[in-house]
Image (cartoon, grey):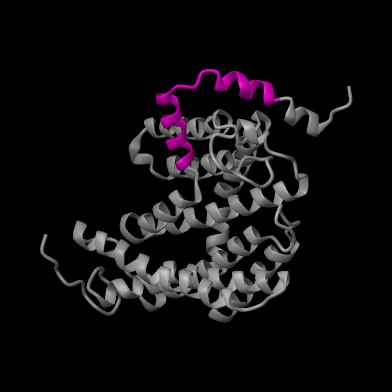
Amino acid sequence: MEFHLYQWVVDGEALIRQVQQLRSPWLDAYFRFATFLGNEEFFLLFMPLLYWSIHKAFGRQLAYLLMLSTYLNTFVKGLFRLPRPPQELRLVAQDGYGLPSGHAMNAVTVWGYTAYCWRQWGGARWLLAGLLALSIGLSRIYLGVHYPADVLTGWLLGLLLLLAWLRAEPGLAAWASRRTAGQVLAFSLLLALAMLFLHPGDADGYPSRSAGTIAGTLLGLNVGFFYEPRRVGFQVAGSWIQRLGRLLVGGAVTLVFYLGLRILFGLLPVDPVTGALLRLVRYAFTGCAVAWWGPAAFVRLGLAEGKQRPVMELAP
């Protein structure tokens, strides 16, 4: 029997309609919250919180994995260019291509890696990670923004990427630790440009805006994660007031570059290629702010202990 990928995907519409017959206010709330755990807005809050205030090394590695997972997802989307379910089935706003589901893929990589690393939680960590991945994936079907095939493919790719990352990450970290500043800068820039221009494009065209976002962020993170321990060396330990202060200060530092460059570059008349490059630059500065300049501000303001300046005690 000849296999038709498009038909296999869209045949899942019947299952979406069956699932949505079970709708209730409680299920609506549950799956909307589950899908929020895979949204960009959630990761914009969760990743800096983790890196700045909970566990620095784990936050750094998880950020790399999330960037890699997101890029691979958009790359595969751009290759297949398969549609999402009809607009009438969508309970939340969502555009772009469908297969594979980014929410499902990132759920497996992020929460699977979290469960693997936080072994002190015991066997329950795998149950929790599985529940999160299952709920986030199913939420995309329930909310009518992905076909079941999209979610299944996302789960599978996420698992394959997670296994590959667990095998390759120690070697990559050892290789990176032996590089000089010049090598890091050159490699990071070349990698970012390759990610931008080798991406097949998305629903908005070529070069892909999402590829520019991911490539620029990864460029900034690479540079920031290289220089931060050498120039700042901040520690996550501290009172809850200090940790909260880091979120406020770090968020402000990051927004200066994120919004400031957005306004500045928005004043320039640009073609698609130049626009994509400016987007890469904007997110590179934003990534550097998260990884390096925000932590430098923490130490300077006494919100964290660093290599050169001790922490200032704050009243509880």
The magenta segment: 12-36
Q: Is residue 109 above or below residue 12?
A: below
Q: Does the magenta-highlighted stretch encompass residue 253?
A: no
Q: At 40% from the left edge and 52% from the top edge, which residue is drawn?
A: 46
Q: Can residue 239 be seen in this view?
A: no
Our reading of the magenta stretch's main secondary structure is: helix
Q: Judge by depth and name the residue closer to the eye, 45 or 14.
A: 14
Q: Can residue 149 be seen in this view?
A: yes
Q: Judge by depth and name the residue closer to the eye, 88 or 64.
A: 88
Q: At 30% from the left edge and 76% from the top edge, which residue is drawn?
A: 307
Q: Give the farthest residue toward the left.
A: 315
Q: Where is residue 247 in the image (x, y as percent from the top left)?
A: 31, 61
In the picture, the quarter occupied by the N terminus is top right
Q: Give the farthest residue toward the right.
A: 2
In the picture, the quarter occupied by the C terminus is bottom left
Q: Where is residue 140 in the image (x, y as percent from the top left)?
A: 56, 34
Q: Where is residue 5 in the image (x, y as percent from the top left)?
A: 80, 33
Q: Where is residue 297 in the image (x, y as percent from the top left)?
A: 32, 75
Q: At 49% from the left edge and 22% from the top edge, which residue is drawn?
A: 23
Q: Does the magenta-highlighted stretch encompass residue 27?
A: yes
Q: Quadrant of residue 255?
A: bottom left
Q: Is residue 57 above or below residue 221?
A: above
49 sits left or right of 2 in the view: left
Q: Judge by depth and name the residue closer to the eye, 286 or 25.
A: 25
So how many labels did they put on this image? Answer: 0
180 sits left or right of 193 in the view: left
Q: At 69% from the left edge and 60% from the top edge, which residue is drawn?
A: 208
298 sits left or right of 280 in the view: left
Q: In which quarter of the image is residue 279?
A: bottom right
